[in-house]
Amino acid sequence: MIQAPEYIKTIKPYVPGKPIAELERELGISGSIKLASNENPLGPSPLAVRAMRRGLQGVNRYPDGSCYYLKNALAQKLNVSDEEILLGNGSNELIDIAVRTFLMPGDEAIMAHPSFVVYSMIVQAAGGRNIVVPLKEWRHDLQAMASEITDRTKIIFIANPNNPTGTINTKDEMDAFMEKVPDGVLVIVDEAYYEYVSSPYYADSMKYFRQGRDILILRTFSKIYGLAGLRVGYGISKGAIVTEMNKIRQPFNVNSAAQEAAIAALQDEGHLKRTKRLNEQGKKYLYRELSALNISYVPTEANFIYISFKEEEAMGLYEKLLKYGVIVRPMGRHELRVTIGLSEENKRFIETLKQIVGSKAVGSKQ
Ligand SMILES: Cc1ncc(COP(=O)(O)O)c(C=O)c1O
């Protein structure tokens, strides 16, 4: 039988958040909630849904492979030129395209751990070497990451905010880091949760783009815009980088309904504000309740919270929560990542957790 190369065989497949329908099918239950994939609990913008419906009339045609109108809308919003934007089938696809464009077998990519697991999978699939640097106090240790740069380094991934910890790197940290990155190394700043950040210290990655550095900024319509099921993400980078990446992009990688919806979603500022407000309220509630239970958590700048238990095993807790119809994401040995949901969902998560672990002290506040 044909054999995949060793570097493919040893990839650990991505485990997505469990879909509600799957859980309910397996357990024969109903009324479950999913706080596992950092989706927008308010749903998509109604403007996006309307635009998508209109667009469905034309699905006998291929989509606009250049995403002309969406690209144009983004370019205007971001004050960049159309040539500096690249659309992807989710930002996931853009990670894949970037790696396949710039990394050759044997080249190195530097990334943090724990961070978004897709980076290392894609690098491995391309025959690259993952250089993994542990987080420091739950944040990217940019100094340590810079010190790992060698002649073989092609890409450095920085998730800002980081998934699963929800932490950010600051302007000062990023300034110092970018000074150490030599020309010819692509820094991918993954800002999937950019719109949720409220810290005044958050690094402005567009500044490095404007300086003409080798940087690719990734953002997505899957999170605050509530369009995860449609798969649209975008990258911002200098024209020369976008041109190379475009060469290996599938010609029709963003479908027409997704393009219509994304253009409309960009105009719905109200939906964004409501989502952010709901997230802030949910965050405060969860902080308060977790503190009352003496469960430690990492303060977040995103729409999820990384919580850590002293003794309980994450996998066991995850499975118990599933039985009550509450889907979260197990992470490390003692950690769960919980998406901030609607207020009733957050409440249900806390009440279920109380039932499982009791109201005894189970962790320690960071
Ligand atoms: C840090 C980060 N980057 C990228 C993605 C991928 O998002 P999408 O492909 O839906 O745009 C996610 C999704 O969870 C994420 O958490």
Image: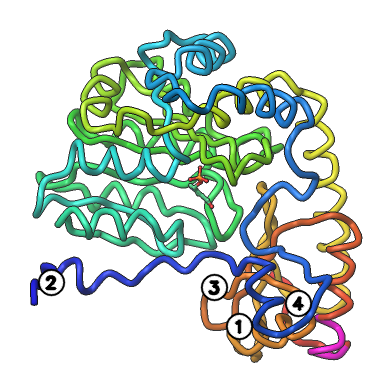
Label 3 residue SS? loop
**Residue position for label 2:** 6
Contact? badges 2 and 1 (CB < 8 Å): no
Nearer-N-terminus badge (1/3): 1
Q: In the image, is residue 22 above or below residue 266?
A: below
Between 334 and 139, which is closer to the camera in this rendering? Answer: 334
Please name the residue shown 22% across and 32% down the image.
248
Residue 24 on image: x %, y % = 71, 76
Report the disc number at residue 331: 3
**Residue position for label 4:** 295
Nearer-N-terminus badge (4/3): 4
Q: Main secondary structure of the magenta part?
A: helix
Q: Quadrant of the C terminus?
A: bottom right
Say few, some or many: other residues with alpha carbon within 10 Å of mark 3 (under 14 / 14 to 19 / 20 or more).
some
Where residue 46 sits, quadrant-wise, is top right
Q: Nearer the viewer, mark 2 or mark 3?
A: 2
Label 4 residue SS? loop
Is label 1's Cβ within 8 Å of ligand 1?
A: no
Residue 116 on image: x %, y % = 45, 56
Q: In the image, is residue 143 above or below residue 357?
A: above
Disc 3 residue type? Met
Q: Which residues are drawn in magenta?
A: 353-358
Disc 4 residue type? Ile
Q: CA distance from mark 1 to mark 3?
A: 7 Å
Is label 2's Cβ within 8 Å of ligand 1?
A: no
Please name the residue shown 11% across and 46% down the image.
104
Residue 189 on image: x %, y % = 42, 38
Nearer-N-terminus badge (4/2): 2
Please name the residue shown 21% across and 42% down the image.
100
Say few, some or many: other residues with alpha carbon within 10 Å of mark 1 (under 14 / 14 to 19 / 20 or more).
many
Asked whether residue 104 is drawn in magenta, I would say no
**Residue position for label 1:** 314
